[in-house]
Image: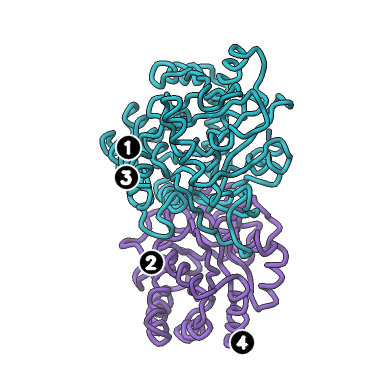
Chain colours: A cyan, B purple
Amino acid sequence: MTSTPGLYGTYGGRYVPETLIPALDELEAGWRAAQTDKSFRAELDELGRNFGGRPTPLTRAERFAPGKRLYLKREDLLHTGAHKLNNALGQAVLARRLGKSRIVAETGAGQHGVATATVCARFGLECVVYMGEEDMRRQRPNVERMNLLGAEVRPVDFGTRTLKEATSEAIRDWITNVETTHYLIGSCVGPAPYPEIVHELQAVIGREARAQFLQAETRLPEVVVACVGGGSNAIGIFAGFIDDAEVRLVGVEAAEAASLGTGNPAVLHGARSSVLSDEDGQISDAHSISAGLDYPGVGPEHAWLRDSGRADYVSATDEEALDAFLELTRLEGIIPALEPAHALARARELDAELVLVCLSGRGDKDLAEVLAR
Amino acid sequence: MKTLVVYLMSGPKTPELAAAAVAGGADVIELGFPFSDPLADGPVIRRAAERALGQGMRTRACLDCVARSRELLPETPLVPMTYAALLEAYGWDRFARDAQSAGATSLIVADLPVDVRPELRRVQLVAPTSTDERLRIAAEHTDGWLYLVALTGTTGARADASPALAGLAGRARAVTDVPLYVGFGISTPEQAQAAAELTDGIVVGSRPVEVAEEGAEALRRYVRTLRDAVDSVVAV
């Protein structure tokens, strides 16, 4: 999808301190070598199948969306409860190929932190996860899971105390420990080649979903819907349909964290993208009930898909997401995470019969937040 | 004579603080333009940036700070140090032009490696992780001097001198004749002297930002201790 390596139109690139450039070069070379190595793909496939539980099923949600043929791609059933494991597994295998023994990561909702802590336990890697104090409060079960898995969770107690600051601190840790450490970024954001790596590792969602939908309906969906924070589950499911020009792609942002809907071109966390920012380039605060969407930036490829018109981006409010969360739970017996609840909120009202929604994660982590309302 | 570069965060009192630093013996002043998410900075400069933004130190106000510092310091090189996000929002060429009109001598952009916008005249940074080839390219493109980042890490005081500096300084010297000034992790006169022995000058940032909180006279006295330390190094 890129015209120049690392660039999506005018988005992407590498806006990082010089210290990291050789590490990004090394990562890029290691990634290229891995992609042409059949044993890398075979190892990932085997791990996805026997450790992760792939392929994940496709479930029709008949009661939730009467009158439509709406299907859920069940990434909530993946090991650790969200699509984040696809990326964490792939990057952990890559880190081992690069000879890195220590992993740092950021986490918002905690799903990426749990996935990273899980693969680090599985491979015997040291694991440090940065998490904003506000997110630690509202995603307590995931903090406890990370601790149990042997990861060190470092609270970030300044700024917004959410994913934005956690990401900055993870990058600062990487700058400091770059010789031994791989930065296992959790979304399709960051400096090149991260957006491409995360895209490729999450593309398994779209590959499976396309084949499953064809099997179920003997045709492609009219529209594919996914929630967008940084945008990794969306880019993963979109990847399966991007060449099918007749399939609409719709990303759903949180209303007060709509980087694509209301952001400006700006530089954040190593890349140029569409970012909630003011006229001086200072980054604005995002707000969302969903910690995973509470981020002022978005992957550069999404900014480019928006500008090119290939994908549309809309938004859902906290209340709309909560309603969808409760309705899917009661009508289908599936408790979704608050993040994909945003996608569910918009999916039902789309003018289409055949709809595919990425159910990117399960909602156990959100119970305290939802019950408190 | 070794060069002493002092970093200060832009703020309402910064021109007077810059003058005090020069009175204490600073040769060059870096003026931080605060960014909300400064990846290369440790806690001291990050907090200073938060405070400065709270005081309304946006790009336009920072450019005014350069202009007022220039009035007080007609001869001293003044170098804005900032992040790509500010230039992206302000306009890259416009930023360079307006900074120069305000009296800036050059520019440092902490998250803009030499491969990105090489045409923007600025002081290039190199790090212990930089390859010899990158050192050479950075030295070719740099504006006046090369900024050696002494360690792999963010800005801020460290207890010990960086073991990586000698290797970096030697590798940089082998590929270029431009002056080499070293920063990151230098705060004490002892560290200043040790770093100056390996290079053509030193940059101090986090400690002066802290001392500036105690006022101009405290800053002048602190900078004087650094001046004496680097002047004790016999030129080679």
Give the CA distance from mark 2 to mark 4: 34 Å
Q: Are marks 2 and 4 in contact (CB under 8 Å)?
A: no
Label 3 packing within 10 angstroms: few (<14), some (14-19), many (20+): many
Of residue A339 and residue B166, the one placed in the foreground of this image is A339
Q: Are marks 1 and 2 in contact (CB under 8 Å)?
A: no
- Residue A212 lies, in percent from the top left, at 57, 15
Answer yes or no: is residue A96 visible: no
Give the CA distance from mark 4 to mark 1: 53 Å
The mark found on residue A126 in the picture is: 1
Of residue A108 and residue B209, the one placed in the foreground of this image is A108
Task: Name the amino acid, label 2.
Answer: Ala
Task: Name the amino acid, label 1.
Answer: Glu
Q: Are marks 3 and 1 in contact (CB under 8 Å)?
A: no
Task: Name the amino acid, label 3.
Answer: Val
Give the CA distance from mark 1 to mark 2: 35 Å
- Circle 4 sits on which residue? B71
Residue beneath the point at 58% across and 55% down: A276
The mark found on residue B194 in the picture is: 2
Label 2 packing within 10 angstroms: few (<14), some (14-19), many (20+): some
Residue beneath the point at 62% across and 50% down: A274
- Earlier residue among tags 2 and 4: 4
Task: Name the amino acid, label 4.
Answer: Glu
- Circle 3 sits on which residue? A153
- Earlier residue among tags 3 and 1: 1
Provide the chain ID for the residue under circle 4: B
Give the CA distance from mark 2 to mark 3: 37 Å
Answer yes or no: is residue A257 visible: yes
